Image (cartoon, helix red, strand yellow):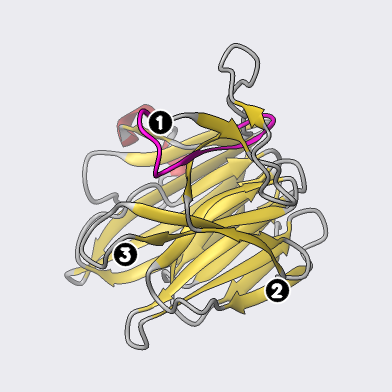
């Protein structure tokens, strides 16, 4: 039987996950609605070691994850509580949680293989630069013919009609006309919703061939069908349980 090698409970809803391909780090943004507090955590995907957990910033709520690159987490603020527009960049060391630099004039545009692409919000038309991830310096002009977008190793499941799967993979009668399904080597991963005693639940199963080697109840007493329950990153199955627990299983 498989077991999760990372299982972390957080004090709030897991709002966003971000994986840094270069440092093999996963970052977690959690939001506690009651306290209006956002926090950030960092876990090494190779060892399972927690670098830091539920780190907070001076801005309690209007901040969030922007991107991650080469051992640095980039955060942003919001221009206002009522709008989606981002403001500023804050760089956090993935190991220590130390703030490396802050810039409230530049804004993040996208992530390239050579680092984050940013622009000065006071200059129009917009000019793009490659920012140094450790210092924030913008000495290089962004050239899309040279500075290609970074690639990731994330695979998301597909929605599939349960009738197309082998009956031994369907342990419960699914609610709805589709389930989430993914194959990796000899593993087959299934996530489905069921309606039990008028309660909607969401399950996850991993099969090695036709043998069940892992299972978990992801959500119970939910009001509607949930989005994809898991992702695959290289050999790792990553999923969220009860909206506040991160689990990672090595396949």
Q: Who comes first in sequence, dot 2 or dot 1?
A: 2
| Whole-percent x, y for residue 108 in the image | 49, 44
Q: Would you name the residue on which mark 3 appears? A: 201
Residue bounds of the magenta highlight? 112-125
Secondary structure beneath dot 3 equals: strand
Which quadrant holds the N terminus? bottom right
| Whole-percent x, y for residue 208 in the image | 65, 42
- Residue closest to the far bottom: 35
Whether residue 124 is in magenta: the answer is yes
Q: Who comes first in sequence, dot 1 or dot 3?
A: 1
Q: Who comes first in sequence, dot 2 or dot 3?
A: 2
Secondary structure beneath dot 2 equals: strand
Q: Which numbered disc, 1 or 3, marks the residue closer to the eye?
A: 1
- Determine contact: label 2, label 3, CB under 8 Å: no
Whether residue 63 is in magenta: the answer is no
Residue at image location 56% in from the left, 51% down from the top: 18
Q: Would you name the residue on which mark 2 appears? A: 52
Q: Nearer the viewer, residue 102 or 213?
A: 102
Label 2 vs label 3: CA separation? 32 Å
Q: Would you name the residue on which mark 1 appears? A: 126
Does residue 173 appear to the left or right of 100 in the view shown? left
Label 2 vs label 1: CA separation? 36 Å
């Amino acid at each position: 039987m498989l077991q999760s090698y990372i299982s972390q409970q957080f004090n709030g809803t897991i709002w966003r996950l971000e994986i840094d391909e270069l440092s093999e780090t996963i970052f977690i943004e959690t939001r506690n609605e009651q306290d209006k507090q956002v926090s950030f955590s960092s876990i090494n995907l190779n060892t399972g070691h927690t670098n830091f957990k539920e780190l907070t910033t001076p801005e309690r709520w209007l901040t969030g994850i922007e991107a991650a690159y080469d051992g640095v987490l980039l955060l942003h603020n919001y221009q206002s509580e009522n709008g989606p527009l981002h403001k500023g960049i804050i760089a956090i060391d993935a190991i220590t949680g130390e703030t490396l630099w802050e810039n409230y004039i530049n804004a993040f545009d996208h992530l390239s293989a050579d680092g984050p692409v940013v622009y000065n919000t006071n200059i129009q038309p917009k000019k793009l630069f490659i920012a140094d991830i450790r210092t924030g310096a913008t000495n290089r002009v962004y050239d899309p013919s040279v500075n290609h977008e970074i690639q990731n190793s994330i695979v998301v499941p597909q929605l599939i009609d349960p009738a197309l799967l082998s009956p031994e993979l369907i342990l419960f009668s699914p609610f709805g006309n589709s389930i989430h399904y993914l194959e990796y080597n000899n593993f087959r991963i299934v996530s489905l919703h069921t309606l039990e005693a008028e309660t909607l639940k969401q399950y996850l199963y991993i099969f090695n061939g036709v043998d069940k080697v892992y299972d978990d109840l992801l959500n119970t007493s939910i009001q509607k069908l949930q989005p994809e329950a898991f992702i695959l990153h290289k050999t790792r199955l990553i999923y969220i349980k009860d909206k506040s627990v991160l689990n990672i299983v090595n396949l």
